[in-house]
Image (cartoon, rainbow, N blue to C red):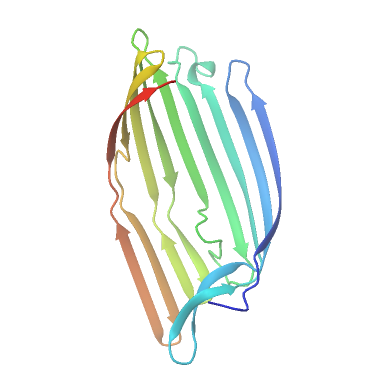
C-alpha cells in the first residue's frame, strides 16, 4: 500500500458531431481531451532490502483522441450492391505522461488506434440473416516509468453468426466467436542499475461455438 497516495483527478471536454442519413444510418465524429492530475500507476522501487511494487502518483498526464463511426446500408453508397447493413468505427488516441520520459510514455492500456468493422445481411426468400464482426487493436509499447516498460501484442477478433427466424417471435442463432484465434502476447521489463528483469507471457485464445434459441415475450 501507499498511505501518501493522492486521488487521481481528470478534467476534460468532448465535442461530438452526428449526421443522420435520409435512408437510415448515421455518421458521427467525436473529439476529446483529458487533463489528468496525480496519475496513479504501480511502480517498482527498492526499499533498502527488496524491490516492491506499489501504487504511486507519477504526475500529470494528457490524453486526447478522435473517434469516428459510420452505420449505413451498403447499397446507399454503391449502386447494385447487396443491401448489407454496415457498422464500423475507428479511433485514434494519443497520451503523454509528463513526468515519464518518452517515447511511448502513454497511458496504460491505451493503444494508438483501434478499428471495428461488421455487417448483417438478410437473405432474400429465406428467413435467414447472416453477419459478422472484425475487431483489431495494434501492438504497442508503453513506458510506465523511467525504468519500467510494458508490451501489448496485437489483438484480432473475428465473430460470425447466422439467425434463422422460425417465427416472428422465435429464432435459432448459431454464433462462432473468435473464428481465427490469435494468442495474446504481453511483456514487461525493468532496468535499475545492474538489475534487469524481462518477462513475456503468451495466453492462448479459444474459439467458441454457441447455438441458442431466442424468444420474444
Toward the top, the furthest residue is 125
Residue 41 in picture, x, y percent from top left: 55, 69
Q: Residue at (43%, 27%) from the top-left corner?
A: 119
Total count of labels: 0
> Taking 140 as reference, is 174 left or right?
left
Residue 181 in picture, x, y percent from top left: 29, 45
78 in relation to 28, above or below? above
> Taking 148 as reference, is 202 left or right?
left
Residue 189 is drawn in which quadrant? bottom left
Q: Residue at (51%, 76%) from the top-left corner?
A: 54
> Taking 159 as reference, is 207 left or right?
left
Toward the bottom, the furthest residue is 48
191 in relation to 176, above or below? below
81 in relation to 142, above or below? above
Front-most of 160 and 27?
160
Q: Residue at (44%, 50%) from the top-left corner?
A: 138
Residue 8 in picture, x, y percent from top left: 64, 65
Residue 136 is drawn in which quadrant? top left
> Taking 158 as reference, is 94 left or right?
right
Residue 111 in picture, x, y percent from top left: 50, 53
Q: Residue at (64%, 23%) from the top-left corner?
A: 20
115 in relation to 111, above or below? above
Q: In which quarter of the image is the C terminus?
A: top left
Front-most of 120 and 191?
120
Amino acid at each position: 500500500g501507499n498511505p501518501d497516495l493522492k486521488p487521481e483527478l481528470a478534467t476534460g471536454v468532448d465535442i461530438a458531431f452526428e449526421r443522420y442519413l435520409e435512408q437510415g444510418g448515421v455518421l458521427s465524429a467525436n473529439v476529446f481531451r483529458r487533463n489528468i492530475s496525480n496519475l496513479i500507476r504501480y511502480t517498482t522501487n527498492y526499499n533498502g532490502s527488496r524491490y516492491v511494487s506499489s501504487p504511486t502518483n507519477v504526475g500529470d498526464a494528457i490524453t486526447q483522441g478522435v473517434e469516428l463511426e459510420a452505420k449505413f446500408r451498403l447499397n446507399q453508397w454503391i449502386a447494385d450492391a447487396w443491401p448489407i447493413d454496415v457498422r464500423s468505427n475507428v479511433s485514434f488516441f494519443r497520451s503523454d505522461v509528463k513526468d515519464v520520459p518518452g517515447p511511448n510514455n502513454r497511458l496504460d492500456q491505451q493503444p494508438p488506434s483501434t478499428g471495428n468493422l461488421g455487417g448483417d445481411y438478410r437473405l432474400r426468400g429465406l428467413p435467414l440473416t447472416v453477419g459478422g464482426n472484425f475487431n483489431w487493436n495494434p501492438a504497442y509499447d508503453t513506458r510506465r516509468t523511467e525504468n519500467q516498460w510494458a508490451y501489448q501484442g496485437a489483438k484480432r477478433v473475428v465473430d460470425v453468426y447466422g439467425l434463422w427466424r422460425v417465427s416472428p417471435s422465435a429464432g435459432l442463432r448459431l454464433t462462432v466467436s473468435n473464428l481465427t484465434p490469435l494468442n495474446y502476447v504481453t511483456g514487461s521489463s525493468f532496468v535499475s542499475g545492474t538489475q534487469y528483469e524481462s518477462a513475456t507471457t503468451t495466453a492462448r485464445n479459444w474459439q467458441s461455438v454457441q447455438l441458442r434459441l431466442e424468444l420474444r415475450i
